[in-house]
Image (cartoon, helix red, strand yellow):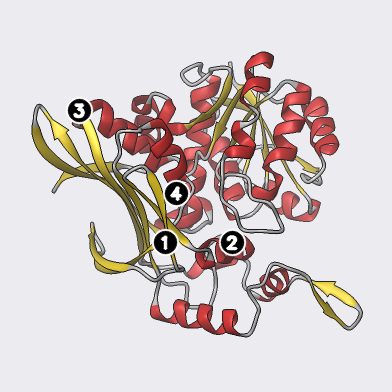
Amino acid sequence: MGKRVLIIGAGGVGRVVAHKCAQATEAFSEIAIASRTLERVERLVASLPRRALARRVDADQPDQVAALVRELKPDIVIHVALPYQDLAIMDGCLQERCDYLDTANYEPPDVPRFEYRWQWAYDERYRTAGLTAILGCGFDPGVTNAFTAYARKHLLDRIRTLDIYDCNAGSHGKAFATNFNPEINLREVTAKGRYWEHGRWVETEPLSISEDFDYPEVGPRKSYLMFHEELESLVKHFPEIERARFWMTFSDSYLEHLRVLGNVGMLRVDPVRFQGVDIVPLQFLKALLPDPSSLAENYTGKTSIGVLVEGEKNGRTKRYFLYNVCDHAACYREVGAQAVSYTTGVPAVAGAMMVLEGLWKRPGVWNVEQLDPDPFLARIASMGLPWHVQER
């Protein structure tokens, strides 16, 4: 029998999650979608191939989330709104005894700190309540964590080094835009880099280290070292890893816009007094930039994202790259979204299915690499994200 799902968030990723839930008629018998702007939710609901409920919620308010969960009685909440709202939604789910899943870790609004500690602190309460909370079940984090767990389970007896490579080789035709929420994206990219080596974090200046990497179906691209949240959980749950890094590609035009915006103060997250009103420059910039969901129609090219692991198998050094390639135009034809949203939304739905089917139903707070990767990776492959293992 199908289950009830509540999707919080109606942006690009929310669109993919809603359409994929609507396609999975056996898994989800009832769908509800909620966001701060009801009109946006109603437009999304109207695009679906079957009926769904539209609701308004201020996801910054735990009581509003709890009231909505109490009204709709979902079996799981898929949170694809803003990372600032993780704790409020976790509180609402805990209050009304509902399982929870998100795609990005909590981040305080006033400072860009990408850490899991705030959400990990909920573990005992979720265990006591018999509830499951799955953290970071997008692509990276999410699928990359499952790739790591799969490599450790099937390919290597020990992982020594891990490098996550994320390439968006697509083109949206805009002078400057971000592929997901501009505020979150720009805070992430402009933060100091960090990587794990020999038991400690090494900090670097933002985007100061780069190397060329050969991406499947894309080719060599200059990739920049930065911190990404899955590194924190992966080195915690695989303490054998001696070095772990994250790399992402950026076009020269994107980097030049970033430098100029930073130089004039438009990337600041602290309030600035302007004509008697406090404004946050980055939030004002967000209002000027294209909505990421509006980029999908004319997006061309592909994303190529994967995990390069090196370690030992039966005493021999082995090296593997586990990856997915996703086409922007194909995603738009299927669900009206671009590949960055698609690669995040599909794993979120697959992860929710894992919980509802009992495969990942475990009381407590979990990162994806702590759970069985096999059924999850099989499910995303069947839902539009085929993945491959390449020995290097």
Q: Are marks 2 and 3 in contact (CB under 8 Å)?
A: no
**What's the distance in space between the residues labelled 2 and 3, CA to CA?**
42 Å
Estimate the x, y position of residue 378 in percent, counting from the top left. 34, 30
Kindly identify which numbered label has been placed on residue 343.
4
* Residue nearer the viewer, 242 or 263: 242
Q: Are marks 4 and 3 in contact (CB under 8 Å)?
A: no
Residue type at the position of mark 4:
Thr
Q: Which residue is mark 3?
A: 157
Kindly identify which numbered label has been placed on residue 293.
2
**What's the distance in space between the residues labelled 1 and 2, CA to CA?**
13 Å
Residue 220 visible in the picture: yes
N-terminal-most mark, 1 or 4: 1
Pointer 1: residues within 10 angstroms few (<14), some, or many (20+)? Answer: many
Q: Which residue is mark 1?
A: 329
Q: Residue at x 68, y 51 (%)?
A: 108
Pointer 2: residues within 10 angstroms few (<14), some, or many (20+)? Answer: many
Estimate the x, y position of residue 277 in percent, counting from the top left. 89, 75
Q: Are marks 3 and 1 in contact (CB under 8 Å)?
A: no
Pointer 4: residues within 10 angstroms few (<14), some, or many (20+)? Answer: many
Q: Residue at x 26, y 64 (%)?
A: 218
**What's the distance in space between the residues labelled 4 and 3, CA to CA?**
29 Å
Q: Quadrant of residue 384?
A: top left
Estimate the x, y position of residue 255 in percent, counting from the top left. 45, 77
N-terminal-most mark, 2 or 3: 3
Q: Closer to us: mark 3 or mark 1?
A: 3
**What's the distance in space between the residues labelled 1 and 4, CA to CA?**
13 Å
Q: Closer to us: mark 1 or mark 2?
A: 2
